[in-house]
C-alpha cells in the first residue's frame, strides 16, 4: 500500500508512527460559526433504562419513530446547524467547554470523562496537523482504521475543520478490500489504533 503517513492513536496522543520530530500546533484564531437561533428541545430524561424511546408506526416495513415525534419526522430549522461540525459547535456553545461529551474507559474499569473543550482542542490539533502535512480540503481524504473511541470522533471533527473527508476502514472488509479502498481514494494519511492493524501497512 502506498501512503504518505500513518498516525497512531495509542494513549490518546497524535503521534507519527514513522515520525520525524515532535511538532507543537497553535490553536489560536480557529473559530467556527455557532448557531445563535432557538432550536426545539426534545430531549427528556427517561424514567428508567427500560423506557421505550421509539414507537412502531408501520409493522409491515418495521418503521419506528421517536416517541416525541410520532406524527411527523422532525426537521432541523433552517437557521439551525446543518452539518455535523455545526452540530458539535452548537453542543459546545450550549454545554460550554467544561460540559461532558463522552467517557473513555480506563484500565481500572472506570470511565474518564471528556469535555467539549477537550474535543475542540484535540480536533483542532488534528486539523492543524493535516494542514501541516499538506492535505487540502475538498481534494484529499483521510482514513481511520480503528474501533469506536474518543479519538475517532476527534479525527472526524479535525477533518471537518479543514473540509477533509474521512474514509472508515474495518477488519471485516478484509485486506484486499482495504487495499482497494486506499488506492481508489488515494488516501495520504491513515489513523490506526492497534499495532496489528499497523502491520498490515508495512507489507
Image (cartoon, grey):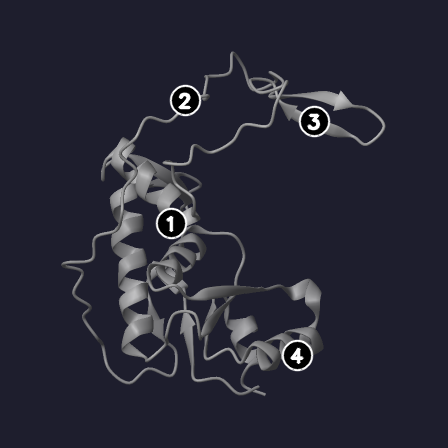
Distance from the alpha carbon under mark 3 to that under mark 4 = 36 Å
Q: Nearer the viewer, residue 43 or 177?
A: 43
Q: In which quadrant will I find the C terminus? A: bottom right
Mark found first going from the N terminus, 3 or 1: 3
Provide the residue designation for mark 2. 41
Provide the residue designation for mark 3. 64
Residue 86 x %, y %: 36, 45
Q: Nearer the viewer, mark 3 or mark 4?
A: 3
- Label 2: few (<14), some (14–19) or many (≥20) C-alpha neighbours in 10 Å: few
Distance from the alpha carbon under mark 1 to that under mark 2 = 19 Å
**Outermost residue, left side:** 28
Provide the residue designation for mark 4. 180
Question: Is any part of residue 193 visible from this angle?
Answer: no
Dots 1 and 2: beta carbons under 8 Å?
no
Residue 85, numbered label = 1
Distance from the alpha carbon under mark 2 to that under mark 4 = 43 Å
- Label 1: few (<14), some (14–19) or many (≥20) C-alpha neighbours in 10 Å: many
Determine the secondary structure under disc 3. Answer: strand
Q: Quadrant of residue 74?
A: top right
**Outermost residue, right side:** 60
Q: Nearer the viewer, residue 15 or 168?
A: 168
Amino acid at each position: 500500500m502506498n501512503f504518505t503517513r500513518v498516525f497512531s492513536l495509542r494513549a490518546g496522543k497524535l503521534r507519527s508512527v514513522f515520525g520525524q520530530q515532535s511538532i507543537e500546533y497553535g490553536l489560536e484564531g480557529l473559530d467556527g460559526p455557532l448557531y445563535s437561533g432557538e432550536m426545539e428541545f426534545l430531549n427528556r430524561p427517561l424514567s428508567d433504562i427500560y423506557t421505550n424511546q421509539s414507537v412502531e408506526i408501520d409493522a409491515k416495513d418495521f418503521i419506528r419513530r421517536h416517541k416525541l415525534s410520532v406524527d411527523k419526522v422532525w426537521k432541523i430549522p433552517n437557521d439551525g446547524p446543518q452539518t455535523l461540525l455545526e452540530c458539535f459547535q452548537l453542543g459546545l456553545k450550549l454545554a460550554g467547554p467544561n460540559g461532558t461529551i463522552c467517557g473513555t474507559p480506563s484500565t481500572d474499569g472506570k470511565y474518564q470523562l471528556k469535555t467539549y473543550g477537550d474535543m475542540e482542542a484535540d480536533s483542532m490539533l488534528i486539523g492543524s496537523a493535516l494542514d501541516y502535512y499538506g492535505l487540502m480540503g475538498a481534494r484529499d481524504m483521510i482514513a481511520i482504521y480503528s474501533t469506536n473511541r474518543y479519538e475517532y470522533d476527534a479525527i472526524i471533527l479535525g477533518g471537518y475543520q479543514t473540509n477533509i473527508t474521512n474514509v472508515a476502514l474495518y477488519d471485516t472488509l478484509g485486506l484486499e478490500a482495504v487495499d482497494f479502498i486506499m488506492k481508489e481514494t488515494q488516501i495520504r494519511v491513515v489513523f490506526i489504533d492497534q499495532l496489528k492493524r499497523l502491520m498490515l501497512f508495512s507489507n
